[in-house]
Image (cartoon, rainbow, N blue to C red):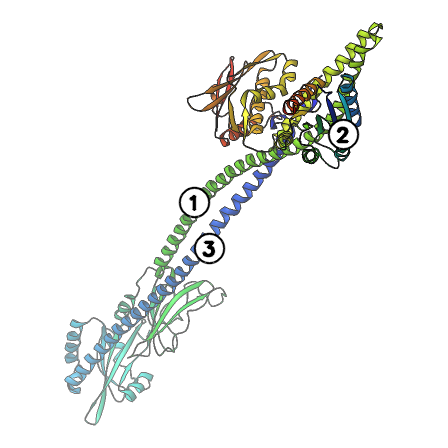
Amino acid sequence: MPLIPLSFPLFPARLPKHSERNQRNDTAMERNYRKLWWQHCLAIIGFSVIPLLLVNFFLYHLFDTTYTDKVMESLRSNAENRRDAIDLFFRERIAQLYTIANANSFQQLTDEGYLNKIFEIMHVKSDSYMDIGIIDSEGRHLAYVGPYYDTLKQVNYKNELWFKEVQANGLYISDIFMGFRKTPHFIIAVMVREKNTSWILRVTINLKNIDDVVQKAWAGHLSDAFIVNKKNVLQTRPRFGGNFLDVPATPEYTADSLKSHPYPDYSSVVATKLERVTYSGMDAFFAATPIHNTKWILVIKENPDEMLSPLVKGQHWMLLFMAAGLAIIATGAALVTNTLINRIKEADLVNAANADMLLQANKMIALSKMAAGIAHEVNNPLASIAENAGWMKDLLAEEDIAGSKNYTEFSESIDKIEQHVARARKIVHNLLGFARRMEPAKEKIDVNKLLDETTGFLENEARYVNIQIAKEYADNDPVITSDLSQIQQVVLNLLNNAIDAIGHDGTVTVSSKDLETTGEVEINVADTGKGIAESDLHKIFDPFFTTKEVGKGTGLGLSISYSIIEKLGGKMKVQSKVGVGTVFTILLPKQ
Amino acid sequence: MNTLRVLIVDDEDDLRETIVKRLNARKIQTEGAASGINALEILKDKDFDVIVLDVKMPGMDGIETLQHIKKLKPEIEVIMLTGHASLEFGLKGMQLGAFDYVMKPAPLNELLDTIGQAYNKKSGLTL
């Protein structure tokens, strides 16, 4: 008959439910870790990326504003420089005309041979003059030098608008016109007063010179520059689209298309004006500035893409750096989080082992109380049974019953009762001993006695599977001061493991040695089991390491034992050889 | 040598009575008391050589009873009978003057040995 009360689950190895609980815990933890990982990672990324983005956008905006301002300023100075060049051109021409008009007499200049000479001198300095003519106050063309002699010589300008204006102002610069020549040109006329009469010196100027000056403002590949008059009519040919005397407009402009627009009208500008114009299909910087000597407006158009290309490049670099930054932050966050989570995992594992030990300890305490209760309750009836059986034995010896035929049967029965009471008594004492030892204490322990009691728990179990428990105790009954119950727990665990390792048919040798030199007592539990592979030997005390089937063991027994012995100031060692057996050694200090 | 007089104090009737019968059958003059108070009453009128005292009893427990006995009649030897495997009560009893302790359920031989030793000690002192 197996000793039921003694096979109570003393160790986790005998608690299948324990491992189920662990597995459930593990999966719950797994989920937690993943969530934790993401939370932590995203928090790091979030807190790093948001400031990065803010700083980047602020810097970009600052750079953008500054750079655009600078570009606009350079556009203004470009426009004003061009305007000054045009102004200079006009001033030179006008000055030259005044010089000619005043340095020569009306008589001299009306002589066409003389005028031709003057014209040739002028041509040496500049090829901008196309022709020259002298007109009297009645509008008659008195002298003319130029390619259209036959046509123009006959013309009377008396009723022409410019003629009236030059008479009124003394100077006139015309807008561009095609005139008789059918090529764009303009005139400069100055009036000279001489005594009572006045006459006019008029020159036609090739547009090419103005064009040359204006075209120098075509700084970029897409920039444009042109001149418009007060009626917003083109005075020079723009680079893209439009022609002389047209309204300035985008190249694709047609009057009936809604998709495109004419350029803004700058004809009434009185001071330099800068603006960025964006509307459907067009994005452009415009600079408009009036030319002083004429009624013309110089307009310079720049393509922002070209003007701001460094800014766009900067934008690209910024995006690249931001992407790189993000990648670095993300990688860093992932690495840091990995390390952190691994540490948490390790800590959790240790905590789980500790919690298991605590749970185990609590279980043992509850169990011990129950055992003590049962033992006490069983004790009294057991004592009564023993005494009554003893009384019957006493009587049996006295009376004549000795002669009765059933005397031997009675006698044997009583002996059996006493024998089993003795056995029950031993169990109860063991139970009480076990219960008492749950209270942690420092007490004097007779090691040999402890080993005897502990092996007593398992002797029956061992006998059923034909395992011998051999005892090789030290002769001098060594005594140590330590916690008896905990040592008993460890020895019991080792004995259990030894019996499990053998399975059936074998010998467990329990031995004690008094090590006089080191002041320690050595306890050995050796089995003739299958042994432990060398590769597993160093892991044997690790928590959760087990070679038992799933559900049979949690791998906590030896790790708990190890920590108990360590706590008591002792050492635990293992030696094993596959096929020969395993020896667990406990070294305990005497004090 | 006078007859050995023993008082058994135990709340378990069957056990106490059987022990009393068995000791009487061995020519030991034995009486039983069902509680500590009962025992102290009996002690007022009679003398005993040895008292076997159960530790765990309802009402007055063994330790308390022992203290009263030792005040009343210090010459009587007391053997503690304990259900506890713990040495505590036995040792405590011995500190308080008990002769020894025996664990329940004890074979009668063991009890008889201890009673004999206690009686010898007492006789050695008194004689």
Q: Position of residue B97 (x, y in %)?
A: 63, 31
SS label for mark 3: helix
Alpha carbons under labels 2 and 1: distance apart: 93 Å
* A455 with respect to B112 (left or right): left
Amino acid type at circle 2 is Lys
Q: Earlier in the sequence, mark 3 or mark 1?
A: 3
Front residue of A204/A21: it is: A21
The answer to whether B13 is drawn above or below residue A319 in the figure is above
Q: Which quadrant of the figure contains the N terminus of chain A?
A: top right
Does label 1 lie on the same chain as label 2?
Answer: no
Outermost residue on the front side: it is B127
Q: Which residue is mark 2?
A: B46
Image mark for residue A332: 1
Q: Which residue is mark 3?
A: A50
Nearer the camera: disc 3 or disc 2:
2
Q: What residue lies at 22% left-to-right and 92% top-to-bottom?
A: A197
Q: Are marks 3 and 2 in contact (CB under 8 Å)?
A: no
The answer to whether A175 is drawn above or below residue A7 in the figure is below
Chain of the residue on which disc 1 is drawn: A
* A530 with respect to A307 (left or right): right
SS label for mark 2: loop
Q: Position of residue A236 (x, y in %)?
A: 33, 70
